[in-house]
């Protein structure tokens, strides 16, 4: 894998290095990325992916992709397919076949039977409310379930009845027998299995009992020979249970759970449940809406795998939470695109310019670099003619002080072309400016006119030889720094009404008639824009604004 993932150091890497040096770890390092297929992956998952695959890569180990699919009601094949393609797009290759926790259903069952046989699990008939009462609180111990002393033979029979579908939803659960007085609530006889009559996307109707995460996860890890099970901090309190399951079943090995802080970004939501709501309630066009913090949304917006990996490296891996400035993510994509994005010109709000001294009917072709600093990227052909378009915002009839763009009598350079001076403003009968009549200086291609340097440079396209496009000017989806922090305010209240401004009638230079789909373009002076075949409108190609040019994060952090 790439050099950048090799270099970044973090506490988990150090921990593994130490254990290898001390000899407490021998053999291959095996990690896993274990998404639940109940939604699309988001930027937080990218951090976990980069960490798990990055660690495996550093130690020449392996990383598995395992679907943690033990909640059939919320999961689907659509999510599985999307997750696989997102991981691959980020640039990672999992070891062997994709794995599914559901592949191990039979094994989970056998291990549960083992626990019952060693008097470490029992079938419990307490309802949810009673269960909560018996559980106690953080300050008070819980009480043993009345079913706790059920004879082992009965537990075995009843557990097999649970599997055989002889009870109804929720009638019984299987619980571990640990300690109802444990200060750690997770150890108070936690549920291992529950009854759910639900069709599973992988196993169909073969099962009506499904294991809980805390039971299935350590076993899945052990069955796959995972050595380091990296998870987010909210599982720290579950680690004793993770270890208990491994210690009390005959699993083939003992993986080690290590927790790290979740990635939180300001102006962003990283919860699949909430993102799903945005999709289900139509607040966005789907999981891959370019405003979504999903990997598929960011991909469609023009983010590159390189920029996401760099961002994850910049964020680092640590034990303490905190919120990262989304400006840092935007910085990472700008840095990447600045060096690689092909340049082009796009006029968002065209204003016609007639070059009165350019011969009617003639035209010429200017050869401009694809990238000003990288000659290897070649050149592009840009037609120049008597009628051009510039952006309305680049003209001011009564310019403010220090105006560097076009105004009556003032000369500007057209990027890569000639210098021109505005001589006349033409209005329609409603008083709208419809045309600027300008004179160009034929001696100024690549050189300044004698005696002075034009103050400004504006971008342009040929009126006759350019392509009409649709522009999606995307902005942050939320206009609040922490959209889901307030308990009494629904996070959708903080959606940014300006997060999508669609511009029709924009025009790009002719070289974009067949746009490339691998990298965004830098539209000069405007920002980075990525071709989006999915949203072309009436035959006009659409471009999504990936990010603007101005980098306030870099400024603030320099
Ligand atoms: P969500 O709350 O968005 O549903 P999740 O943890 O339930 O997230 P999973 O599919 O279980 O989603 O996550 C797969 C892996 O990604 C887990 O190991 C999880 O810890 C990790 N992960 C999820 N969200 C983040 C995040 N914001 N930062 C870092 N890792 C994350
Ligand atoms: Mg989860």
Image (cartoon, grey):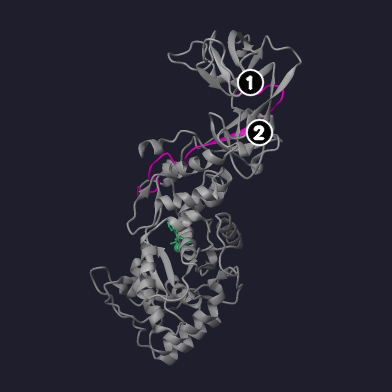
Distance from disc 2 to disc 1, alpha carbons, whole Å, reads 22 Å
Can residue 272 be seen in this snapshot?
Answer: no
SS assignment at label 1: strand
**Would you place residue 236 above or below residue 445 in this image?**
below
Callout 2: 10 Å neighbours few (<14), some, many (20+)?
some
Callout 1: 10 Å neighbours few (<14), some, many (20+)?
many
Query: Residue at point 76% right, 15% down?
Result: 361
Residue 63 belongs to magenta span? no
Pinpoint residue 381: horizontal percent, then vertical percent.
69, 29
> Does mark 1 have its CB less than 8 Å from ligand 1?
no
Query: Residue at point 44% right, 90% down?
Result: 154
Q: Which mark is residue 389?
A: 1
Q: Quadrant of residue 494?
A: top left
Query: Residue at point 70% right, 34% down?
Result: 513
Q: With 321 as the anchor, is 273 left or right in this view?
A: right
The segment highlighted magenta reads 460-487
Q: With 508 as the anchor, is 238 left or right in this view?
A: left
Pinpoint residue 293: horizontal percent, then vertical percent.
49, 48
**Would you place residue 358 above or below residue 91 in this image?**
above
Q: Which of marks 2 and 1 is in front?
A: 2
Farthest-out residue, left: 139
Pinpoint residue 53: horizontal percent, then vertical percent.
49, 62
Q: Which of 105 and 318 is in front in this view?
A: 318
Q: With 150 as the anchor, is 446 left or right in this view?
A: right
Between disc 2 and disc 1, whose residue precedes? 2
SS assignment at label 2: strand
Residue for badge 2: 379
Total number of numbered discs in the rendering: 2
Q: Do the residues labelled 2 and 1 touch (CB within 8 Å)?
A: no
Q: With 84 as the anchor, is 251 left or right in this view?
A: left
Q: Which mark is residue 96?
A: none
Image quadrant of ligand 2 equals bottom left
């Amino acid at each position: 894998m790439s050099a950048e993932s090799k270099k970044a150091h973090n506490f988990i890497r150090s921990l593994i290095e130490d254990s290898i040096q001390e000899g407490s770890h021998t053999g291959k390092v095996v990690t896993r990325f274990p998404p639940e297929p109940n939604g699309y992956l988001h930027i937080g998952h990218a951090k976990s992916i980069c960490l798990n695959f990055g660690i495996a890569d550093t130690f020449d180990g392996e990383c598995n992709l395992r679907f943690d699919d033990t909640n059939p009601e919320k999961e689907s094949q659509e999510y599985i397919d999307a997750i696989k393609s997102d991981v691959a797009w980020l640039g990672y290759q999992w070891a062997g076949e994709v794995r599914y926790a559901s592949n191990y259903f039979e094994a989970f069952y056998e291990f549960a039977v083992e626990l019952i046989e060693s008097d470490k699990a029992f079938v419990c008939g307490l309802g949810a409310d009673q269960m909560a009462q018996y559980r106690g609180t953080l300050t008070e111990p819980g009480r043993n379930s009345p079913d706790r002393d059920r004879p082992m033979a009965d537990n075995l029979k009843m557990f097999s009845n649970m599997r055989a579908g002889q009870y109804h939803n929720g009638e019984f659960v299987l619980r571990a027998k640990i300690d109802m007085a444990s200060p750690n609530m997770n150890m108070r006889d936690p549920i291992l299995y529950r009854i759910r009559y639900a069709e599973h996307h992988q196993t169909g109707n073969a099962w009506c009992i499904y294991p809980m995460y805390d039971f299935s996860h350590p076993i899945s890890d052990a069955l796959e020979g995972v050595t380091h099970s990296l998870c987010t901090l909210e599982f720290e309190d579950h680690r004793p249970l993770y270890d208990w399951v491994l210690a009390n079943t005959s699993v083939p090995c003992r993986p080690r759970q290590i927790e790290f802080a979740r990635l939180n970004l300001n102006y962003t939501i990283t919860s699949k449940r909430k993102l799903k709501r945005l999709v289900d309630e139509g607040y966005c066009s789907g999981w891959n809406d370019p405003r979504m913090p999903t990997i598929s949304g960011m991909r469609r917006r023009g983010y590159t795998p390189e920029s996401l990996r760099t961002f994850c490296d910049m964020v680092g891996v640590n034990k303490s939470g905190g919120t990262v400035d989304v400006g840092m993510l935007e910085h990472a994509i700008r840095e990447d695109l600045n060096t690689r994005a092909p340049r082009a010109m796009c006029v968002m709000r065209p204003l016609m310019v007639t070059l009165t001294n350019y011969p009617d009917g003639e035209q010429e072709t200017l050869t401009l670099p694809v990238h000003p600093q990288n000659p290897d990227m070649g050149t592009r052909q840009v037609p120049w003619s008597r009628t051009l378009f510039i952006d309305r915002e680049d003209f001011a009839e009564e310019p403010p002080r220090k105006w560097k763009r076009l105004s009556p009598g003032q000369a500007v350079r057209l990027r890569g072309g000639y210098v021109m001076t505005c001589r006349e403003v033409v209005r329609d009968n409603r008083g709208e400016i419809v045309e600027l009549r300008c004179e160009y200086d034929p001696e100024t291609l690549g050189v300044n006119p004698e005696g002075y340097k034009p103050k400004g440079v504006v971008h342009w396209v040929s009126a006759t030889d350019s392509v009409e496009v649709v522009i999606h000017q995307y902005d942050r989806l939320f206009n609040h720094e922490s959209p889901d922090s307030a308990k009494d305010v629904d996070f959708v209240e903080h959606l940014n009404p300006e997060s999508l401004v669609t511009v029709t009638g924009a025009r790009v230079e002719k070289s974009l008639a067949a746009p490339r789909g691998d990298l965004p373009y830098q539209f000069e002076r405007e920002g980075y824009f990525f071709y989006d075949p999915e949203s072309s409108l009436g035959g006009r190609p659409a471009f999504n604004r990936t990010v603007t040019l101005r980098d306030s994060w870099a400024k603030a952090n320099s």
